[in-house]
Amino acid sequence: MRWLEIAVAVLGVAVLMVSTFGSSRVFRAGSATKAAHVAEEQEWEALRHEGARAVAQILALARPGFRLVTWRGGSPNMAAAELLITFTDSDGEHHRVTLRTFIDQELLANFSGGRPLPIVYAKSPTALRVAVDRDRTQLEIPSSIDA
């Protein structure tokens, strides 16, 4: 009888450790996704006045695997989204880029494939920086940065 109590206690500790480890992985993954999506808005702030403007074509909209939704910019329904876009820069060079941003869930349908998307970008010899141009877009993307 004593060995059964020990086995149940060991099993309980093992289940507790697995659930703690699993939940911490989910939290870290959500934090990393949130940081990557907030970075796009910060990129827009940096490019807003100095970047070149263009109109991209949305190829596809995807959501992260665990469909992160958070309260941002006065909206409780800001969904993490990944936009695959293509555009031609001022030099005539074609680019295909994935933008990670937060979009209000009610507006996700407005970002479907084939639709135009105003962007702002900057090219350097080492990298291409691209962000949604929130000054020109007719589809509102509320702020995702905490006030």
Image (cartoon, grey):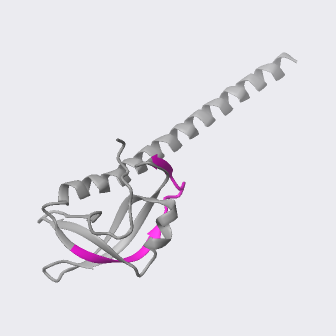
The residue shown at (88%, 18%) is 1
* Residue 56 point in image, percent of width and height: 30, 76
Q: Main secondary structure of the magenta part?
A: strand
The residue shown at (38%, 58%) is 101
- Marker count (numbered): 0
Whether residue 31 is in magenta: the answer is no
Depth check: give the residue in front, 76 or 1. Answer: 76
Q: Horizontal placement of 2 versus 137: left or right?
A: right
Depth check: give the residue in front, 13 or 93. Answer: 93
State the image quarter where residue 118 is shown.
bottom left
The residue shown at (36%, 47%) is 35
In the rendered view of the protein, which quadrant contains the C terminus? top left
The residue shown at (27%, 52%) is 42
* Residue 57 point in image, percent of width and height: 34, 79
In this view, 136 is above or below 100: below
Query: Which residue range is magenta in the image?
Result: 54-71
State the image quarter where residue 9 is shown.
top right
Depth check: give the residue in front, 86 or 44. Answer: 44
Residue at the limit of the structure toward the top, as seen here? 2
In this view, 110 is above or below 3: below
* Residue 109 point in image, percent of width and height: 50, 71
Whether residue 57 is in magenta: the answer is yes
Q: Horizontal placement of 27 versus 42: left or right?
A: right
* Residue 122 point in image, percent of width and height: 16, 65
